[in-house]
Amino acid sequence: MRRSIFTEDHEQFRATARAFFERECAPHTDEWERAGKVSREAWRKAGQAGLLGWEAPEEYGGLGIRDYRYNAILSEEMFGTGSAGIGLGVQNDIMTSYLVGLTTEEQKKRWLPGFTSGEIVTSIAMSEPAAGSDVAGIKTVARRDGDHYVLNGQKTFISNGLLSDLVMVAAKTDPAAGHKGISLIAVETTTPGFRRGRKLDKIGQWSADTAELFFEDVRVPIDNLVGEENRGFYHLMHNLPAERLGIAAYAVPMARRVLELTTSYASERKAFGQTIGTFQVNRHFLAEMKTKLDVAQTYLDQCILAANANELTAQEAAGLKWWTTEVQWEIVDRCLQLHGGYGYMNEYEVARLWRDSRVQRLYGGTTEIMKDLIGRGMGF
């Protein structure tokens, strides 16, 4: 479909992103899937290509540009080239808001040069075994002891958990205050008492490393507090719309990639003497999916522009996240069905994308939570 939100600068960035994914990622997808993580070298090369932390000030290796169209382009080219797994979305779509928007100058000097070069891989640790969408229910505690916090707790489902060098941890610095007592504390993974647990065995997204993290009397300098003490919950809520926008920016190009693969397959695969795409029922399915995908793309593009104008609301981001991920799943599942038995074979890309798509309706807040947020925003 025709899109009018990009400029020549964006298209130059797109060409750079496409070349990076074609050269450094797509050829290694199967290898990374087997290993359960990507190579650190790929991260460094992403930094060299200027694909990390462009929102950071120029003196720290960024471009000083806040424009979510670049985030969307990166997602589109990753999936468009058949690449998978490298967690650039966590770095660019989520962590940039914290490390650029909430840090002190001293913290920027410490972390941003490595963040933009790919030498520092980051992750955010909110979810716990008994607290997923309910961030206020976390049990991890950071007790003040002189000029340090002493951190104890457990996190799970942490993207980039195996590779991360810097973890943004949501912890209760005032447990009696409930959600008003949560703070964000950055933990270098070389700190004594920090321990990675097992690499989690997921249904899909095998090369996107996901792990458990443990904190046992981890002493963290108070200088690693990000934002204001006991305001962490509000920092998280402020930045969650950007995370949900990022998930939607994955959903649409993933679905588009699957539809492209299926359209090609349906034009070549024959049954009963004709290509399967020419059967009316299949032709109608393909037409429906194309139209729904175009609608989702328009919805996403408008939310990207709203985010650039600082006008994207939490309710709008929630609606975008649930709608695009549900459309994504509908399209991916139907496309696998059109592949027949071959769609169930792991050697086909459609099988991987089907596995990888299922979690989109869960992380960043489940579809049910998104609908509830929208309903509350309507006054109910």
Image (spheres, helix red, strand yellow):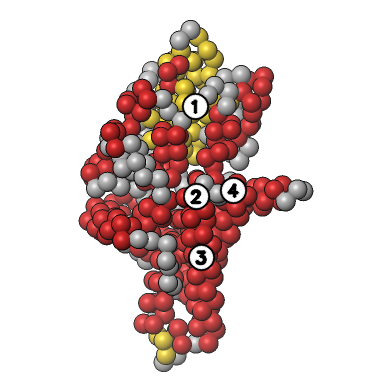
Q: Which residue is mark 2?
A: 309
- Residue 313 circle label: 4
Q: Which mark is residue 3?
A: none
Q: Nearer the viewer, residue 275 or 72?
A: 72
If you read the primary sequence from the N terminus, does the residue marked by circle 4 or circle 1 appear first?
Answer: 1
Residue extending farthest front: 309
Which residue: 41% across, 86% down? Answer: 275
Residue 141's place in the image compared with 255, above or below, is above
Point out residue 299 in the picture as x, y percentages from the top left corner: 54, 62
Q: Which residue is mark 1?
A: 227
The residue drawn where x is 45% and y is 41% is 94
Dot 3 corresponds to which residue?
298
Tell me which numbered mark, 1 or 3, is placed earlier along the sequence: 1
Query: Which of labels 2 and 4 is toward the front?
Result: 2
Label located before the other in sequence (4 or 3): 3
Q: Amino acid at mark 4?
A: Thr
User: Where does the image place residue 226, in percent across and percent down from the top left?
Assistant: 47, 26
Secondary structure under badge 3? helix
**Dot 3, crowdedness within 10 Å: few (<14), some or many (≥20)?**
some
Contact between labelled residues 2 and 1, with CB atoms less than 8 Å apart:
no
Marks 4 and 1, how far apart in space?
21 Å
Residue type (three-letter) at the residue carrying disc 1 = Gly
Distance CA(mark 1)–CA(mark 3): 34 Å
